[in-house]
Each structure stands twice: as structure tokens, then as C-alpha cells.
Image (tube, helix red, strand yellow):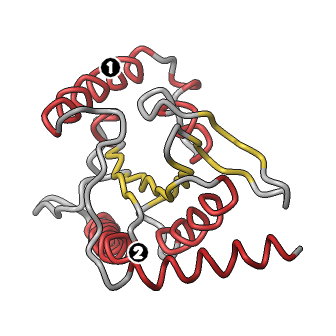
Amino acid sequence: MKKLILLAAWAIAGVLLAADKPSKPVTAEFATAQEMKDNWEAWTAFLKEKYETLPEDKKPRTERDWQAFIKEKYQGTEEWHLFDGSRVDLVTKDYAIELDWASETLKWAESIGQSLWYATNLDKKPGVILLVPVPSTAAASDSPETAELKRGVKSNIHKAITVCQRAGIKLWQENLYEYTGKTK
């Protein structure tokens, strides 16, 4: 119990101290930023092709489905169980990662707290993957509902970027529309 209290205090202190410093981008598995970008583009192309070849009833729809779909891209193990019954969405060599929807009002904030908890318990860096179902840029042809969804996504992404940068949390944005082709 004493160790748990010390770990919690350490995590809170780390977050507060990190808030005073800008975070540095991390390219964990890659030697250069260009290598990461090239690899990322290759993975995006691979996953788009994989998505297109899946039968309609096998295509990812839920957060859990997308977690299984993209785990290879992040070289992660999914659904890692912790002592308290919580489950880490993805665990990589360096990160404990929480996935959540950018389109839902407070999910971005919940994911930040969860990633900090998971990282503390696994002695890893915290990470968040925001699942973005549609582009955040509105188009003139968008219905009022779609335009409102896109404004919410854009706002949530901005908030997540701001908080993650201040707290030293690695943030990825997984643009699902790049795989699905759905922009509305």
C-alpha cells in the first residue's frame, strides 16, 4: 500500500513538473523523423488496403475493433490487465497507450488520465491515440449535424494537444477516414 501511495504521489508530481516544460517529440522506434514519417505512411497505406479487403461485417466499428486493427502499426500488445482490474488498450516497448474517440465530448480528457495511471503502473511513458472518424475541416456540402461533429472533433483535438504537450504525454491522431474513405 505504501508503494502504491508513493507511486501515485510520484505520478502527480511528475505531471505538475512537466506542466512547466514543453514536451519534446518522441520517435521511439525510429532513428530519424524522416524514417518515422516514411514508416507511418507505409503503415497507413497497408492498413487502408487491409480495411478495403475486409468483408463489411468484419470492418472495425468500435474502439476495441480499431484497437485490434491498428495494434501492429504501434507494435503493441492489446488489453494488458493491471492489478486493479483496469485494462491498458495498447502497451508498447516504451508506452502505455489509451485509445479514445476524438468525436466524443470528454473522451480525450479521460484518455489522458487513464494513460497517466497506466504508465505509472507499468513504468512506461504515457500515450494517447485519438481516433478521428471524420476530417476536422468542415466542407460547404456538410449537413448541419456533420459540421457540428467536425467542429467538436477539431476542438477536442486542440484541447488534447494542449494538455498532452504541457503534461509530457505522447499524442497520436489516428485518422480513421484515411482507411474508411468516409468524410461525413
Task: Please report contact status of discs 1 and 2: CB closer than 8 Å, yes or no.
Answer: no
Which x, y percent locates residue 177?
31, 42
**Tag 2 secondary structure:** helix
Asked which quadrant contains residue 141, the reply is bottom left
Front in this rendered view, residue 114 or 28:
28
Front in this rendered view, residue 3 or 44:
3
Which x, y percent locates residue 131?
42, 52
Instruction: Please tell me whether residue 80 is drawn above or below residue 161 in the rendered image.
Output: above
- Residue assigned mark 1: 46
User: CA–CA distance between discs 1 and 2?
Assistant: 32 Å
Q: Looking at the image, can residue 99 be seen?
A: yes
Q: Residue at the spot x=66%, y=53% of the render?
A: 122
Disc 2: CA contacts within 10 A as few (<14), some (14-19) or many (>=20): many
Q: Residue at the spot x=38%, y=68% of the render?
A: 168
User: In which quadrant of the rendered image does the N terminus lie?
Assistant: bottom right
Asked which quadrant contains residue 157, the reply is bottom left
Which x, y percent locates residue 117?
64, 66
Q: Looking at the image, can residue 144 be seen?
A: no
Residue sticking out furthest to the top: 53
Residue sticking out furthest to the right: 1
What's the residue type where badge 2 is placed?
Ala
**Tag 1 secondary structure:** helix
Q: Residue at the spot x=24%, y=23% of the render?
A: 42
What's the residue type where badge 1 is placed?
Phe
For marks 1 and 2, the one nearer the N-term is 1
State the mark number for residue 97.
none
- Residue assigned mark 2: 167
Give the label, 1 or 2, closer to the camera: 2
Q: Residue at the spot x=57%, y=67% of the render?
A: 116
Tally the numbered discs: 2
Q: Is residue 124 left or right of residue 73?
A: right
Q: Is residue 28 left or right of residue 45?
A: right
